[in-house]
Every structure is written in C-alpha cells, then in structure tokens.
Amino acid sequence: MSSSDADVTNAIQMKLQQNGEWDRIYVELSDQLNELGWIDDLYDTAKERSRDDKTNLQRLLEDLKPTAVNGIPKELRTKIVAMIQASIERVVQKG
Amino acid sequence: MPKSSSDTSDSSHESDSPRKRVVSGPDDAMDLDDLSPAMVAVTCEHVQGLEHSTDMLPKYQKTLKWHSSFNSLRGPRLKRQKMQPPVCSSCKIPLRRPAVCLQCRFIGCWTREHVQSHMRESGHTLAVDLITGSIYCAACNAFEPAPLSLESKALPTFANKEEDSRKHKRLTYKSWQPNVIEKTALSSANTIPCEVRRGFLNLGATCYMSVILQAFLHNPLLRNFFLSDKHNSKLCGKLYCMCCELDQMFADVFNPSSTQNVDSGAGLSVGPLSLLRTTWQNSNDMAGYAQHDAHEFFITVLNQLHSGSADATHGSSCTCVVHQIFAGQLQSDVKCGKCGHINPTIDPMLDISLELKGVPNGKMPTLASCLRRFTEKETLPANAYVCSNCNSSTSEATKQLSIRKLPPVLCIQLKRFEHKSSAAKIDTPVKFPGIINMSPYTTAAIGMQVREGKVPKLDPATTYDYELFAVVNHEGQLNTGHYTNFARSQNEWYRFDDEKVTHTTLRECLQSIPYMCFYVKRNLDYGAASNAVPASMGPPPSAPSVANGPPVAAPAPVQPTSMKDISIVSKSTDADDSDTDSQTSEQ
C-alpha cells in the first residue's frame, strides 16, 4: 500500500471510530462469534496449547491466527464485510 | 493433556509454569507482612516491580481510567467518545485497542507489531493493553493479567466521572491485612491449601444434591461468605440450620482431616449426611431417598438459607446472603392493544427458567436465542387482559418480559422436564458460552419504562458480562437419570460425578448438554463503592488450619467485615433505590 493509500485508510478508519460505526460493527461481530462458540473455542485451544512450556506468545499467535480467521463462518464474514462496506460508503459520501 | 485420574485432595497444579510462585502446601511459611492477593500466584518479576514503581504505577492507573471513560462499546455514546481516538506512534493507524508503553509516551498497534519493535528499540519492558488492563512484558515476552490490588483501582467500569456524582459515599476496596492479634494467632497456625476439589458420596440417589452442592462450593461469593465466617456454625445456636450446614460443608471440603471426609477410593470425599437430614427436616417435599429434581433442591436450599439467616427480612429488600447473591428482578410489561397503555409488574426472582418447548427444529438453539425468546413480545389471547386505562379487553394485548435487575450470580435453568406428563424430557442440546453479556435482555436495553416516563440508561458494557463457573448436566429420563456437573476452580475446569472428580477442559464442559448454568458477574460493585472488583478474586491459596491454634476468623478479602455494610448490589437498571415492587411470593 502506498503511503497516500495508507493515509486515506487511516482517515476513513478514524472517521468510523469517531462516529461509532466501528463500535457497532465490532459489537455485532463479537456477539455473533461468541454465540457461535468461536471465542470459547479459540480460548480453549490457546489455553491448552499454552500449557506446553516450549511455546511462547509469538508462536501461539502465529499458530492460532490462521485457524481463527478460517474458523469464521462464511455467512458471518459476508455479513460483516457488507456492514463495513456500507459504513465506508457513508463516510466517503459525506466527504 | 488434562489429567484423567481422580484428583480430589491433590492441590498442586500439574501444569504450573516454572515462573509462577504459588504459595501452597503445608511447608510454605506464610509471609504475614505481605498477604495482599496480588503477591500470591504472581507472575514475572517485572510486573511485580510495577506495584512499587513511582512513575509507572500512576501512569498505569491514569491511562486505564482515561480509557475507560473513552471506551464504551455498547450503550449510549458519551461526549468524549466523539474525540479523536489515539493513533499508533509508528504508523498512525487509529487504535481501538491501544497498547501504551509505561515508560514513555509511545502508543502502538499490535497488528504490525509496532509495540514489540518499540520495546526492542527503546529497551522498555512494560506496556499495558488498554481494553483488558493486562500488562505486556517484553523481557519475558508474555502477557500477564494485572496484579489484583492494582486491578481494583483501575478497572474500567465506574471510573466514569458521571457515575461519581451519586448520593452515596463511596467505599474503596482494600485488601485485608492482619492486625497484631491476628498476626500472632496466624503465626502458630498451619497453612493448608485452598485449591481443593472434593467429591460427594452418593447416599442413595443423592446425585441431585451433589451437583448443587458443587455449584455452591464453586460460587465465589458464597465461598467468600462462608470462608470469612459470616455465619459461624460454632456460634449459631439453631437446630437444623442450613447456614450452619453449608458453613460446615465449606470447612470440611477445605480441611483434609475433617471427620466428614471419607476415603471413597477416588480420594477424600465428603459424606453430606447432616446436610441431607437438615434439608428433610425443613422441607417435607424433599424427604426420602427418592431421586429429586436438582433445580427443586437448589430453590429449597436457598429458601432454607434465607429462613435461617440472621439478616433475613420479608419484602423486597432482604439483605440475607441468598438475596444479596441470587436475587434479581423481572419486569413484565403488558401493553393494551387499543390505547397503548403499558402496565408494568415487577417480580422478584432467584433464577431464570427458559422454555425449550417450541424451539424450532434445525439449528441447535443457543442460550442467547433462548433468552431472546424469553424476552420477546408475546401476544395475549383476546379477553385475557383488561386494560386499567381504557377498560378494553377485546383488543390483543402484548406482554414482554425483561430483566430489570441482574443478580451478582445468575442461575439459568433450561426447562427440560414437564412435571405433568410422566418421563417427558426435552433432551435438546443447547449451545452456551463461557462468557455472556446480559445487556440485551435488560429492561433498559429493551426500552421499557422502568418508572413512568423514565427509560433507564445502560451502564458501561462490562457490567453486564457474566462468566460461567458451573454447569449441571442430567442424563437419562426424569426418574431414572443421573446428575453430574462441571465446575471451574482457579480457571481450570473439573467434572464431578458424585465422588469422582476429574480435571477437564472448558471445551468438554461447553460440549455437554446443560440443565442448569451458573454465571457470576465479572465485575462486582460494592453497593456504595466506586471501584469494581473481579468476582474471581478469592481468598489467598493458603488459609490457616481450623484444627490447630486458637480459632481465628479466616482472612476476609473484603473490608469492612460486616455483610450489612457491603450490601453487594448489582448495578440495577434504575437510578433510584426505592422500588415500588409488588409483594409477590418467591418462586
């Protein structure tokens, strides 16, 4: 990403965090993931994995990130992406 | 791998990290000058150093306080939230989850590892994750939860200035320190480990009792109440007093040389004969060796505890241990189909019972979906309701339930048994979470008027977070089944089957078919206090032995000592204290 792209992304993200859209999407995602058991699943995997003294924080994060991301059901992913898209459009339109 | 062998009297954790310093076992001398919970079962030396540092500690507290007022994910948005969120010092990305270096002005992001790079380049060691208050130690490359004594001062629940302008004077939490007399008494006492799980002997189809007793034993508020001598069975004079029975049970469980403990082949287990006898004595319904319903036993014991409690009062504001811990309020709003007038009724509750009848086939129901059904608008049949405003009874009225006041400990029962027809059990599995947020089911969130014209505000989201600590399971049919349960002790999960106790995982627990689920509020507030305290905080892992030395009150992690002064109240959805409750009987 070029630095001007990064600036634009940051500006949009800033707007979304200020107008509350970010929070709204975060809460929706978090609630859905919790209800599906995704959070408990990840927590339990991480906890059991971390009993092994040979592992460290970085390794744990590296190992678990792909499973975590892939574990998000397609339906939920589509829904959240649509919510994000709609929020971005609203911010961009306002100028 | 979780242990599969029985684990009843063994107190040491098989998975102790070598860095942890845990005070346990009779050979450890108690350091009487330093009994603050923070210093026990603690973490790396860098985080330990935080408590005594003159520059990092105030910064830690200030940043958490600031962030808590800034960050409120659910509920109404405060003015200050419309301010600019902080940005990463390296890449300028706006941060919703900032990590703040405790040694300089750096604020960084995790996703691009700018926090870690900063720590490496600057040589600083500690950073705090603002959402959880956890501390990242770059030297040990690990996250540590904040030491308990610090956490209580900085938890992001009521640091909000707007909350501070309440009429009550606020108490700050102080961890207990022994006075001179207590120190002398303690120095001659033996330490015994507090991390004990014991099974219960089955006295003849009493598994319904074992599971509920385990739920009581693992209830942090109830445990703290009895272990801090709030009802001393040696001093109470009453016969067949349920409070004494529970006090004795807690003492037996933690004392390996108690005469109530029997070697059951699976370790030392408790034979709760006296408790069973007392239950029968006070409640004819529960007498006899037949199998009973665990939920019925639960309510029976709560009623007996209430009756036997010195603090019990009739009416809505009883301050006995049962009501302080389990009592909440349900609001039922009936809306007239014709004139729209809403008639609210408020009922006390000790638990929530959710229907499983009529759950649609297909996807497995979740606890959240059951709670949504519980609080959804229901149309009453015509002529069922006469409106007090317009006297119409023909239009369809709607009724909606909501939780007006959440108790510190929430017991949720799934109605699997229909007592009218014989042996009709609804065995549908229900998916339930380790942490549940109860705000969507409250009267405030549902928008019903708590009092005329007034819709209460939602409190900060974290006050509605509840953590699972026990689950009761039932296998088989109504009268020929067997009860077992899961319970959480020091963040480890165990399965209890009468006298057999096995170490297991959260996953195993969540995969079971629940009958009753017990949740405890994550952040408690002391009624008149400003700072919330994590409910999972308990007595330090060592407690003086009751058998040796002069009788000494077990260390109470709470000051002041009288339960009356504390009055643990869950943050209710209405701002005022006087309730115009209808005097309905307890369920």
Image (cartoon, coloured by chain):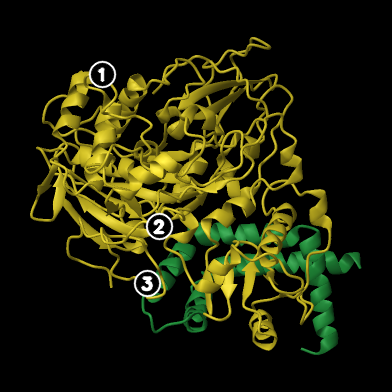
Task: Kindly report the distance in space between the C-alpha atoms of the residues bearing marks 3 and 2.
Answer: 32 Å
Q: Colour of chain A?
A: green
Nearer the observer: mark 3 or 2; the answer is 2
Mark 1: few/some/many CA within 10 Å (<14, 14-19, 20+): few
> Considering depth in this image, is B391 or B254 the residue closer to the camera?
B254
Residue B358 visible, this angle: no
**Quarter of the rendering containing residue B110:** bottom right
Residue B283 coordinates in the image, percent (x, y): 23, 20
Q: Is residue B228 above or below residue B120?
A: above
List the residue tagged with mark 3. A48
Q: Is residue B437 left or right of residue B187?
A: right
Quadrant where the N terminus of chain B sits is bottom left
Q: Residue B238 bears which disc, if any?
A: 1
Residue B49 visible in this rendered orientation of the protein: yes
The total number of labels drawn is: 3
Percent across and percent down for residue A26 are 65, 62
Query: Is residue B25 found left or right of B531 in the rendered image?
Result: left
Residue B459 x, y percent position in the rendering: 66, 42
Mark 3 or 1: in front is 1
Which type of secondary structure does the marked residue at label 1 adopt?
loop
Q: Amino acid at mark 2?
A: Asp
Cα distance between the residues tagged 3 and 1? 47 Å
Q: Are marks 3 and 2 on the same chain?
A: no
Residue B50 horizontal/vertical position (percent): 60, 66
Q: Quadrant of the C terminus of chain B?
A: top left
Give the chain letter for yellow: B
Q: Which residue is mark 2?
A: B31
Q: To which quarter of the image does residue B541 belong?
A: bottom left
